[in-house]
Image (cartoon, rainbow, N blue to C red):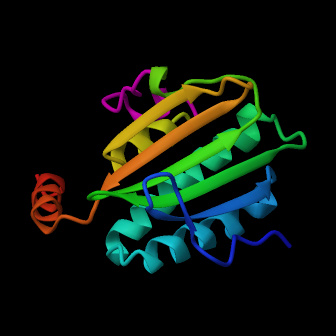
Amino acid sequence: MTTPSQRPELSPGNSPHTTFRVAADVQKLGEIRRFVEASADALQVESAVVREVVLAVDEAATNIILHGYQSQAGIIEITIERQGDSLVIHLYDQAPPFDPTQVPAPDLTLPLEDRPVGKLGVYLIRHFMDNVIYEASPQGGNHLILMKDCFNSNNREEKSNDHND
């Protein structure tokens, strides 16, 4: 069984982070969700925010497995850290380059029967995260950065009011 590092490491900015390397396999999605939840809990992220982050990372990992690696063997590395008021999740893979930030938003005004099946994963990632950044890795592969502002109480109140509209 693949396990996250047991001891928080220090990143260059002296921010503790945890890293998890796992086989790119849909059977490992539960382990990925548990790692994200445990890491966010350890950083004292509110439970409602943790659920959103877990969903976003699950969608990103699923896309890497099914569309990036096309269900072939591969590795996903996930690093979670706090940077200022943000929870930052880095997903690294060696699949062919793909920039999810360039995927057009789905037309949610279409009736359900006229919408394509699926195609909502990237939309959900963008919806639940405050910032989504893609970088092509210089050695090949992809680096997806998901950011959630969640450590500033004023910011959380503003965000919760935004979702109530």
Predominant secondary structure in magenta? loop
Q: Which image quadrant: the N terminus?
A: bottom right
Residue 139 lies, in percent from the top left, at: 74, 26
Judged left or right of residue 2, residue 100 is left
Q: Nearer the viewer, residue 37 or 164?
A: 37
Whether residue 118 is visible, yes or no, is no
Q: Left or right? Give the position of 90 relative to 75.
A: left
| Lateral position of residue 164 relative to residue 89, left or right | left
Q: Nearer the viewer, residue 108 or 138?
A: 138
Q: Nearer the viewer, residue 146 or 110?
A: 146
Q: Residue at x 52, y 56 (%)?
A: 11
Residue 142 position in % (x across, y down): 65, 31
At horizontal 60% and vertical 46% (from top left) the residue drawn is 91
- The residue lying at 70 percent from left, 69 percent from top is 31
Q: How many marks?
A: 0
State the extent of the magenta-drawn residues as a range.
104-118
Farthest residue to the right: give it.
Answer: 73
**Residue sitting at x 49%, y 37%:** 122
Q: Is residue 60 left or right of residue 160?
A: right
Task: Tell me if residue 113 is in the magenta stretch.
Answer: yes
Residue 52 locus on image (x, y percent): 40, 61
Task: Where is residue 164? Give x, y as percent.
Answer: 13, 58
Taking the magenta stretch, the answer to whether it contains residue 11 is no
Say which quarter of the image contains residue 15.
Answer: bottom left
| Residue 147 in the image: above or below residue 111 | below
Residue 128 seen from this side: yes
In the rendered view, tell whether residue 60 sits above or below residue 159.
above
